[in-house]
Amino acid sequence: MNLISGLQEVSRRMLVARGVRSESVVLAGQRLHHFSMKGSGKGPPLLLVHGLGGAAAGFGRVLLPLARRFSRVFAVDLPGHGFSPEYCLGPVCVRGQYDMLVEYCRTVVGEPAFVVGNSLGGALSAQLAAEHPEFVRALGLVAPAGADVGPEAIREVLAAMDVKTAEQSRALTQRLFHRPPWAMLFFADMLRGVYSTPAVRALSADALATGDYLKPEQLQRLEMPVMFVWGGSEKLLPRQSLAFFQAHLPPHSKVKVVEGFGHIPHVERPGEFVSELVQFADGAGL
């Protein structure tokens, strides 16, 4: 077990000790791990979807606070991430990940949910809302990927995530956070293992090869409540991504640039992240 796996296991045990369920389900022949918790709130189920190289454990500090507002809270490990085993699910890897998210919503969540996705998880969640609105009561996009910003910009982002040296690892850590904690910089070299897994390599290659990004018409026809949160300190995704979503999300969307948020605010500023979701849910009558 490497250090990243060890830290994820420690996080998992701490969550389980606090009442969060950690279990695996088999969907369409693929085993997926997820965290779930029965909430005490009256809101709909809430599903959290991580980004490329991320894991459900990254939402560990927000699960319990969100359970006080929503009826159930879920965080799923996409194939090849966290505790879910490697499996690309066919020749088009991104589509395979998306198909598993659809099956998870159909089989495990089982009712329309407030689906919140970060980075790659944001792109998958937006596609889910466009193609299967019956699963999405409301949509939350937090620094989402998926914008058609041109191959050069996408190539630059993926190159930054293709870390091979300690220096590159520290540079990527700087880009992920508003202000990286010293411990994250100290252990930054661990990212080499996170971003060199077969799933991450296959997803990166697929993104470059297919050019299959979100279409403006997919976003424009979204009818459910939509929140879009972009970090004022976003340093991983290009600024053109923000412009793309601003231009194409439907008029009823709540678009907000939050100062002090980087690319993964649920990790860096969990309390403020929860506050953004709860304020949106309250305003949307969820």
Image (cartoon, rainbow, N blue to C red):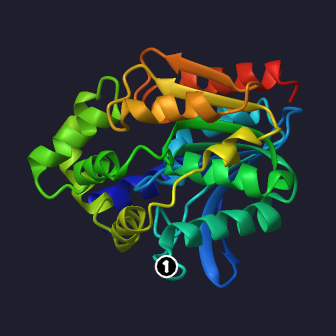
The x, y position of residue 46, in whole percent, is 74, 43
Kind of residue indicated by mark 1:
Tyr
Given residues 226 and 265, the one toward you in this image is: 226
Residue drawn at point x = 49 percent, y = 79 percent: 87
- Picture quadrant where residue 263 is located: top left
Q: Does residue 42 show up?
A: yes
Specify whether 26 is left or right of 88: right
**Where is residue 222 shown, x and y percent of the image?**
77, 41
Badge 1 local density, few (<14 within 10 Å), some, or many (20+)?
A: some
Please provide percent x and percent y for residue 107.
81, 68
Which element is circle 1 on?
loop
Q: Which residue: 15% across, 47% down?
A: 168
Q: In which quarter of the image is the C terminus?
A: top right
Q: Position of residue 48 (x, y in %)?
A: 63, 46
- Whether 177 is drawn above or below 215: the answer is above
User: What count of labels does the image hold?
Assistant: 1
Whether residue 20 is visible to the viewer of this picture, yes or no, is no
Question: Hey, which quadrant is residue 35 in on the image?
Answer: bottom right
Name the residue at the top extreme.
259
The one of 228 and 56 positioned closer to us in this rendering: 228
- Tell me the residue that label 1 is attached to: 87
Q: Please indicate whether residue 8 sits to the left or right of residue 172 in the image.
A: right
Residue closer to the observer: 122 or 53: 122
Quadrant in which the N terminus appears: bottom left
